[in-house]
Image: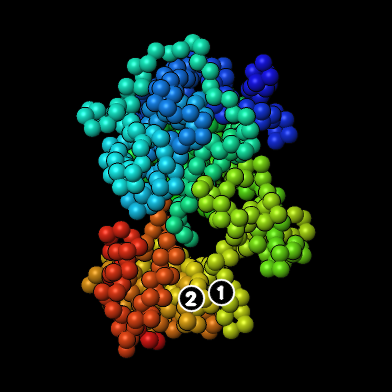
Amino acid sequence: MEMRKSVQSITHGNVEGLTFDNVDPVVGLGERYFATMNQYKDKLHQVDALTGITETKGSVRSRAIKVAIELRNRGVHQNHVVVISSKTHLDQTVALLACLFVGAIVAPLHADLPYDDTKRLMGILQPKVAFCGQRSARLYQRVFKEKSIKCLIFRFGGDGKDFLEFDKCLENREDSNFTPAETKEPKKAAAFVIATHGTERDPQLVAISHYAILMRYLPMLSMCTKAEKLLTFFPLSWITQVLVCCMCFETQAKIIYAGQFTERSACKFIHDLRIEVVFLDGSFATKVVKNAPIQDFDLSCLKREHSRESQSSAAIALSNQERYLYLQRAYTSTEDPLHPPRGPVPVDKWGELLVKTPGMMLGYFGDQQASNKVFSRGYFRTGDIAQCDSDGFIYLRGRISDDIKRDGHIFSSCEIEDIIRLHPAVDEAAVFATNNEIIACIVKTPGQELNATTIKEAAVFATNNEIIACIVKTPGQELNATTIKEFLCDMLPPYKQPEKVTFYEFFPKTLHGQVKKYILKDNIIKLIRDESHGQVKKYILKDNIIKLIRDESFYHSEHVEDV
């Protein structure tokens, strides 16, 4: 009776009245959503924008119970890990809710995660069941065999010849006496394990408790005061998508799945379906503003835009259409910047940003040693350089790993990145540092003559107290180090200017388009060590890349030029 009272007290009434102080964490997410989805059972829960298929919250709950029964029959219980890996669709939502009903730990993995990363993460997760699409099913079958992992694979769709069909789970009869698993310590029990994007190191698994998930989407509930339509462009492997799904389990809001989309189709979805809230990546928002004919669509229905990035140029462009658009970006935390001696820094001084929030992760799943390194006195060490002014506002300068110390100067590699981006031909820039040395990597704009005015993207980092510019150019185009040096000469002080330039075709990137700086740094250092009379040994570069990035060769270095 205590559990029921707690759930009812949380779910009834105006969601805007919920605060961090009045939410009782006595129940887990499975118990919580078992009640809320029944409360709003007649409300629409999800829509497939491509097929037009809709489903009520009551239907989602009913199907999730059937899948939960199947999981229990297969020996899946509390704290067992269940992997979900597929494109977003209606059945994926059902599988997610079913896992929470049985108290399993949900590990959503990206469907296109590279094989080596998948193999390593599966070895840590040791899942009991995997719900996945056709592509992931084949990959996981191979991984489980090599790692000797006993894991059942349920495939969404398909003929069921080689794998168990997800629809088989729905053949169970719904048990009116079904009860969700009881989570005894929601603040300590993991509900989700999310893989990091792997921008600074290989992807790690972040364990997040039931309570922390609730605390993370609590500030977003103000956008769900009625049955709003939420459009999201994130895969379930992103924490943003997890929070959106959970928020819809909690409220009357309905989630719209767009499937494959382009800049134009995104605007069309918002226009046709009268979307009120949209969740999107900041870089995608920029593409929408720059490339899509926004004026062809009526986006006046859009009231809120939630982005994972702090950059708001695209959102500002959207809001400038003579209408109101609420932009929601938050860094919810208790900040305490620390100086290298590990003490609080004075006002207006730079230090490392430490955070302590109700939504903080439990730690890195299966890696206590890594967890110990990122926690200090109960605070999470973000690795961000921050400053607090006298009014309590926090300013972020960049990552600690981006700081460069050279000739008595300390500066962020982001400063060099910003200068490179000033060039009209620059499309992207990734700047980083290592061992007090600087390297600049530049990609030229396709179809342009390869010179200082056709830079597409750039990365800067440091090595051997020399600044080296690594440039990705289009095959057949010409570029020399002198022209790059001349372009940067008037823009940067001497201690920030590159001494050498080398050429590449591509930067290694994550699935989300972020440069894998740690791979670029490691390979540049190896190449410099094997440099002979200004010539880079191509076979060494190729071998290193093959080892680091599966069987794909991202780099084709030609030469290193002294300025």
Up-down relation of residue 468 to residue 505 (above or below): below
Up-down relation of residue 35 to residue 477 (above or below): above
Farthest residue in the top direction? 176
Q: Is residue 181 left or right of residue 11?
A: left
Amino acid of disc 2:
Ala
Secondary structure found at label 1: strand
What residue sits 70% from the left and 54% below the top?
A: 377
Amino acid of disc 1:
Ile
**Mark 2 Cα-neighbour bin, 10 Å: few <14, some 14–19, many ≥20:** many
Callout 2 touching callout 1 (CB < 8 Å): yes
Residue linked to disc 2:
462
Of callouts 2 and 1, the N-terminal one:
1
Residue linked to disc 1:
404
Q: Quadrant of residue 21?
A: top right
Count of numbered tags:
2
The reply to whether residue 9 is visible in this rendering is: yes
Up-down relation of residue 426 to residue 32 (above or below): below
* Residue toward you, 365 or 519: 365
In the rendered image, residue 188, in percent from the top left (x then y), is placed at 62, 38
In the rendered image, residue 355, in percent from the top left (x then y), is placed at 66, 52
What residue sits 41% from the left and 35% below the top?
A: 128
Locate the N terminus and report the quarter of the image it occupies.
top right
Q: CA distance from mark 2 to mark 1?
A: 8 Å
* Residue toward you, 372 or 56: 372
> Which mark is on residue 494?
none
In the rendered image, residue 306, in percent from the top left (x then y), is placed at 54, 42
**Mark 1 Cα-neighbour bin, 10 Å: few <14, some 14–19, many ≥20:** many
What residue sits 44% from the left and 29% below the top?
A: 76
Q: Quadrant of residue 82?
A: top left
